[in-house]
Image (cartoon, helix red, strand yellow):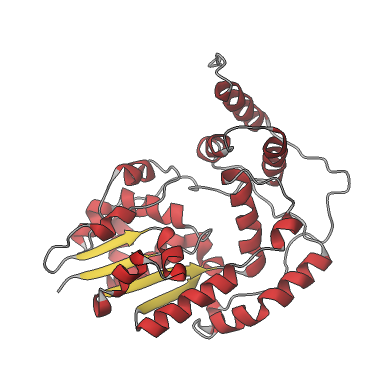
């Protein structure tokens, strides 16, 4: 009997890092009985670049007795929407298991804001973004839909495992075989799809506000892929915004926490800086300035010096 394992996100819980790790070790995974199908996206992932996973593998025929792993954050939204893809997933019945991560609320909010800035052309502040933050509500909807369908699922808190996400996922996927797999697997020497630092985000916010044209994804990717070791510290969130977010997500987080062990509970506590940057001064190092200048000039069809 074939078995389908779907890793569905949630967004901003290390999916790109996991997809790169899985693509890099796809041959080794097969030796442990799990097939992670490759495609053009997974080829990028195996080089440590940002990708969207191997979603297309869901729609390909499975071999007898095959255990197939498919990873894409888009499945999370398919389940939430209850669309045709969700109906296909549900049709696998007891032969499918859903795996996904959640995240502590303010960690998730900050990362979500950063994603909007670097991928969607968003120019709003973090506080403005917080007003529409609905990740816990969407997660609750997904859990309710999975429970109603009787679809097996497992959840873990990314905030507890971000230091060794690949190791945790391997244990979830392989159980007792995980230690042997981790001894043999390859890992990237640098972070994959790091968050942007606050100065980088502030530059992109200004870019988004004034530039009429393509969204800044190319610039964000250049910063992430070429400068993976930039230190990232969380931005300040004001007390009024903290209180509003905590009030809006409390019930949904309490629901989600019913399905998590004590050590995995989603926290709504704010643990970021207690004071704002008083002078709105944002600092870049020489490498960041070089990548920004090269990418902006390239986007304007200029000639780029290589030195």
Which x, y percent locates residue 230? 61, 42
Task: Quadrant for the N terminus, please.
Answer: bottom left
The correct choice, above or below, for 32 with respect to 114 in the image is below
Question: Residue 190 versus residue 157: which sits nearer the camera?
Answer: 157
Task: Quadrant for the C terminus, please.
Answer: top right
Name the side, left or right, on which 123 lies relative to 304: right
Mark count = 0
Write the residue at 51% across / 76% down.
141
Question: Residue 6 versus residue 82: which sits nearer the camera?
Answer: 82
The answer to whether any part of residue 175 appears in the image is no
Name the side, left or right, on which 81 lies relative to 284: left
Which x, y percent locates residue 165? 46, 62
Which x, y percent locates residue 52? 41, 50
When asked about the image quadrant of residue 242, the answer is: bottom right
Write the residue at 70% across / 57% down.
129
The answer to whether any part of residue 251 appears in the image is yes
The correct choice, above or below, for 163 with respect to 288 in the image is below
Name, please, the residue furthest toward the right: 278
Which x, y percent locates residue 150? 35, 84
Name the side, left or right, on which 208 lies relative to 305: right
Question: Residue 122 versus residue 21: which sits nearer the camera?
Answer: 122
The correct choice, above or below, for 231 with respect to 180 in the image is above
């Amino acid at each position: 009997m074939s078995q389908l394992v779907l890793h569905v996100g949630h967004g901003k819980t290390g999916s790109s890092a996991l997809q790169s790790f899985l693509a890099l070790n796809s041959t080794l995974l097969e030796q442990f009985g799990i097939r992670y199908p490759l495609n053009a996206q997974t080829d990028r992932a195996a080089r440590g670049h940002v990708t969207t996973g191997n979603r297309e593998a869901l729609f390909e025929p499975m071999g007898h007795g095959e255990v197939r792993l498919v990873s894409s954050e888009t499945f999370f939204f398919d389940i939430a929407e209850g669309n045709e893809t969700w109906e296909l997933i549900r049709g696998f019945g007891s032969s499918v298991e859903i795996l996904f991560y959640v995240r502590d609320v303010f960690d998730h909010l900050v990362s979500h804001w950063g994603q909007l800035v670097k991928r969607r052309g968003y120019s709003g502040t973090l506080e403005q973004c917080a007003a529409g933050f609905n990740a816990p509500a969407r997660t609750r909807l997904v859990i309710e839909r999975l429970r109603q369908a009787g679809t097996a699922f497992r959840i873990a808190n990314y905030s507890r495992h971000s230091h060794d996400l690949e190791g945790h996922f391997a244990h979830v996927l392989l159980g007792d075989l995980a230690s042997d797999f981790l001894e043999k697997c390859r890992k990237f020497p640098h972070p994959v799809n790091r968050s942007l630092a606050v100065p980088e985000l502030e530059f992109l916010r200004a870019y988004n506000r004034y530039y009429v044209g393509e969204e800044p994804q190319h610039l964000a990717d250049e910063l992430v892929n070429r400068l993976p070791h930039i230190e990232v510290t969380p931005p300040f969130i004001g007390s009024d915004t903290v209180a509003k977010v905590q009030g809006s997500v409390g019930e949904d987080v309490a629901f989600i926490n019913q399905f998590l062990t004590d050590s995995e509970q989603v926290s709504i506590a704010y643990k970021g800086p207690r004071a704002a940057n008083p002078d709105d001064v944002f600092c870049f190092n020489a490498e960041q300035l070089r990548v920004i200048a090269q990418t902006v000039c390239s986007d304007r069809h200029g000639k780029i010096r290589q030195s």
